[in-house]
Image (cartoon, rainbow, N blue to C red):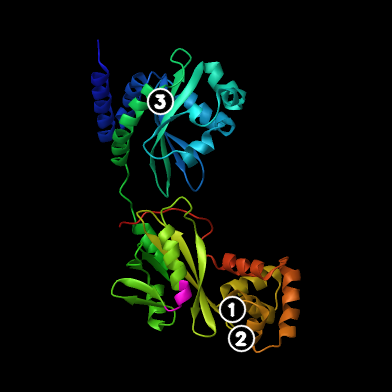
Amino acid sequence: MTSTKDADARVIVAIKAAGAEAQHWPDALDEIARFLDARFAALLFEDRCSALLELKHSTRAERARIVEYLRNHRKLDPIKARVLAEIGVGRAFSIEDFVSRGELHQSGAYQRWMAPFGLADIIGGVIHRSEMGVCLFVAFRDDSAGLADIEAKRRLDALLPHLAKAIARHKPAPDTSALVELFEELTSPVLVVDSRMRVVHRNRSADEMLGEGDALAICGETLTLCDPRAKEALERALARIGGADAETFAIMVKRGDSRCCVMHVLPLSNGLTALFLRRLALNSSEGEGGAVAAGVFGLTARESSVLLAIAEVGGVPATARALGLSEGTVKGYLKSIFQKTGASRQADLVRLVLALESPFRAPERHSLPA
């Protein structure tokens, strides 16, 4: 009779083989399913940007059934969101960790997918979590095996570190040449920094802005901003990179008394961050956001200047001083801008300028070497 220790050793050998050669994953998942008294098992990956759940590997016999779940029934699963958001890495879970049996049996996923196939429970674990997404192991137990008990979870807890090592071996080496070439061709200054603001890469446009000396400087290898409030905001932003709430956002950076730029912060992989800078200038054609707004909303040249000034210096009094106008005149222009853009608050106008100035359309994740 095979002992639990022998079975455990056989499963680990199968996982290591899959880590070395990806074509062995179906066999490894078969071994894991048997070890957990499950009918079949799979490795899934949810991309954080698209929220799409992708089947990476599965046992051969039930692949079509898993694909059917992902396509047609996952949206009816009462535990899907909570698993990805709440479960820590390397800890086994089952359905009853999230919902009662009654809640499960009332769900569409159970009635339309689990019950017809005689499935009773799901046991799984998060293998790794990053800014890219979540890698998840799941195994499906049928009615004959019953609900996952403490022993089944203990067994999976012991396997999850081995799964993590095997999955890590299949991470492709990032091809960064195309991304770096893209940065070089952008007219916007772009810098790539680590969590300590050390510069990993900068394009030619960034070198030009550094030469002007009114917004950025590099001391040794470390980036600093001439605007202390913007520097503090960037430091706070970088401290959040890699967390679950990491996202693209913008920081306004002062450039002397009458100019500023917008710094868009884009989290990358490997703990790095790309900083995209877009110039704004009062009474100047440099303010692309104002020019775009003028074309989209039919703003006059003076209305475009007021729009940019509101975004840069904020408030009617400061805008009036910056443009050399009376506060009443600024209020008149502002009323017209509200009517043309459909905005109702000055904060909406700031967001409008930032959106029009953004050098990228949506939060994406790319890879660059550390």
Residue 190 is situated, as x and y percent measured from the top left of the image, at 42, 68
**Relative height, residue 363 to residue 307 (above, below):** above
**Which residue is rendered at x = 36% and y = 22% of the image?**
151
Classed neighbour count for the residue bearing mark 3: other residues with Cα under 10 Å, few (<14), some (14–19), many (≥20): many
State which region is magenta.
226-230
Please give the residue where the numbered disc 1 appears in the rendered image.
Answer: 313
Classed neighbour count for the residue bearing mark 2: other residues with Cα under 10 Å, few (<14), some (14–19), many (≥20): some
Position of residue 41 in the picture relative to residue 315 (left or right): left
Please give the residue where the numbered disc 2 appears in the rendered image.
Answer: 322
Amino acid found under the numbered disc labelled 2:
Ala
Residue 338 is situated, as x and y percent measured from the top left of the image, at 73, 70
Q: Are marks 1 and 2 in contact (CB under 8 Å)?
A: yes
**Residue nearest the observer in this picture, 52 or 124:** 124
Residue 196 is situated, as x and y percent measured from the top left of the image, at 34, 65
Say whether residue 140 is magenta.
no
**Which residue is rendered at x = 68% and y = 88% of the image?**
325
Q: CA distance from mark 2 to mark 3?
A: 65 Å
Position of residue 301 in the picture relative to residue 257 (left or right): right
**Which residue is rendered at x = 23% and y = 24% of the image?**
9
Q: Secondary structure at mark 2?
A: helix
Please give the residue where the numbered disc 3 appears in the rendered image.
Answer: 41
Say whether residue 228 is magenta.
yes
Amino acid found under the numbered disc labelled 1:
Val
**Relative height, residue 153 to residue 243 (above, below):** above
Classed neighbour count for the residue bearing mark 1: other residues with Cα under 10 Å, few (<14), some (14–19), many (≥20): many
